[in-house]
Amino acid sequence: MFLQTPTPDTSGYMIAGYAIAFITMALYVASMALRSRNLHQDLTTLQEMDKSAREKEAAGKQSGR
């Protein structure tokens, strides 16, 4: 009992592990937010292009009468 070595202090590794995990999760959430913003911008652009194409098509039908 007297010759046993004490349990090593690994709290620094625990803190480092949690820090890495939280940083990774934060980067993932930021990536998802950025992708969502870009997706909404792309959707808006496509809707504007579709609206423009429909207006051109309607104008072409009216002039063709």
Image: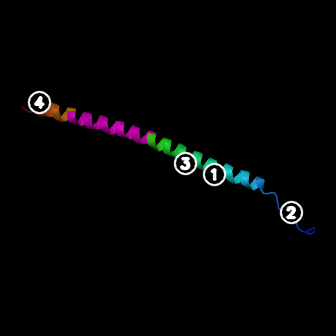
Residue at numbered disc 3: 28
Numbered disc in front, either 3 or 1: 1
Q: Earlier in the sequence, mark 3 or mark 4?
A: 3
Circle 2 residue:
6
Which of the two labelled residues, at mark 2 and mark 1, occupies the earlier sequence position?
Answer: 2
Closer mark to the observer between disc 2 and disc 1? 2
Give the percent coordinates (x, y) of residue 48.
30, 34
Magenta region: 37-54
Q: Main secondary structure of the magenta part?
A: helix
Q: Amino acid at mark 3?
A: Tyr
Which amino acid does the dot numbered 4 rest on?
Answer: Gln
Q: Amino acid at mark 2?
A: Pro
Horizontal and vertical percent position of residue 20: 66, 51
- Kindly report which numbered mark, 2 or 3, lies closer to the viewer in this rendering: 2
Q: Which residue was labeled with disc 4?
A: 62
| Label 1 crowd (10 A; few <14 / some 14-19 / many >=20) | few
| Residue position marked by numbered label 1 in the rendering | 21
Is residue 42 on the magenta stretch?
yes
Q: In the image, what residue type sits under mark 1?
A: Ala
